[in-house]
């Protein structure tokens, strides 16, 4: 059997309030809104890239970064490229993110979104 044409279409983050988390990432990234339902909200990536979706998780338990034995572990995280790491961190904080206490690399800043999902801002020096 030939492999069917498959391509990732999006990434989904669970949240107790999908619209509120979508609004955070909309401010952070400047992406356009898509779906807007109480249980499902989306953002469209520029140029048709992989978008972000946010689904209702009424019993959402934020992951712990870094996770220890018995802690809720993250299942996935976003990597966000930025040319000025300090400016990216400041912008993310103004939008509601927090800087994680543990930072494993000099050129990366682990941030925590408003419902506890870690995401990384990493220094991209490419023009």
Image: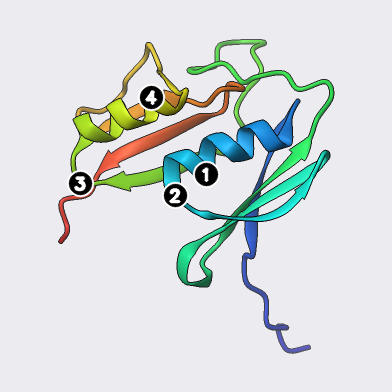
Residue furthest bottom in the image: 2
Q: Which of the image's four quarters has the C terminus?
A: bottom left
Compared with residue 3, is residue 78 higher up or lower down, i.e. above or below? above
Give the numbered dot on residue 94: 4
Residue annotated with mark 3: 83
Q: CA distance from mark 4 to mark 2?
A: 14 Å
Q: CA distance from mark 2 to mark 1?
A: 5 Å
Local packing at callout 1 (Cα closer than 10 Å; few below 14, some 14-19, many 20+) is some
CB-based contact (under 8 Å), mark 4 and mark 3:
no
Compared with residue 90, is residue 32 higher up or lower down, i.e. above or below? below
Which of discs 1 and 3 lies nearer the camera? The answer is 1
What residue is at 58 percent from the left and 58 percent from the top?
Answer: 51
Q: Secondary structure at mark 2?
A: loop
Q: CA distance from mark 2 to mark 3?
A: 16 Å
Which of discs 2 and 3 lies nearer the camera? The answer is 2
Q: Position of residue 76 (x, y in %)?
A: 58, 39
Q: Position of residue 69 (x, y in %)?
A: 61, 10
Nearest the camera: 1 or 111?
111
What residue is at 64 percent from the left and 65 percent from the top?
Answer: 9
Residue annotated with mark 1: 26
Q: Earlier in the sequence, mark 2 or mark 3?
A: 2
Q: CA distance from mark 1 to mark 4?
A: 13 Å
Q: CA distance from mark 4 to mark 3?
A: 18 Å
Q: Earlier in the sequence, mark 1 or mark 3?
A: 1
Q: Secondary structure at mark 4?
A: helix
Q: Secondary structure at mark 1?
A: helix
Give the numbered dot on residue 30: 2
Which of discs 4 and 3 lies nearer the camera? The answer is 4
Q: How many marks?
A: 4
* Residue 75 visible (yes or no): no
Q: Earlier in the sequence, mark 1 or mark 4?
A: 1
Q: Is residue 46 left or right of residue 23?
A: left
């Amino acid at each position: 059997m030939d492999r069917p044409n498959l391509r990732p279409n999006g990434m989904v983050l669970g949240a107790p309030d999908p619209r509120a988390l979508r609004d955070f990432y909309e401010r952070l990234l400047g992406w356009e809104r898509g779906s807007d339902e109480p249980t499902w909200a989306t953002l469209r990536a520029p140029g048709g890239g992989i978008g972000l979706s946010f689904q209702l998780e009424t019993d959402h338990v934020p992951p712990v970064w870094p996770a220890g034995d018995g802690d809720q572990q993250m299942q996935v995280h976003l990597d966000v490229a930025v040319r000025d790491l300090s400016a990216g961190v400041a912008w993310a904080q103004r939008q509601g993110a927090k800087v994680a206490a543990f930072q494993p690399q000099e050129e990366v800043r682990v941030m925590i979104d408003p419902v506890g999902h870690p995401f990384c801002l990493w220094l991209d020096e490419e023009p």
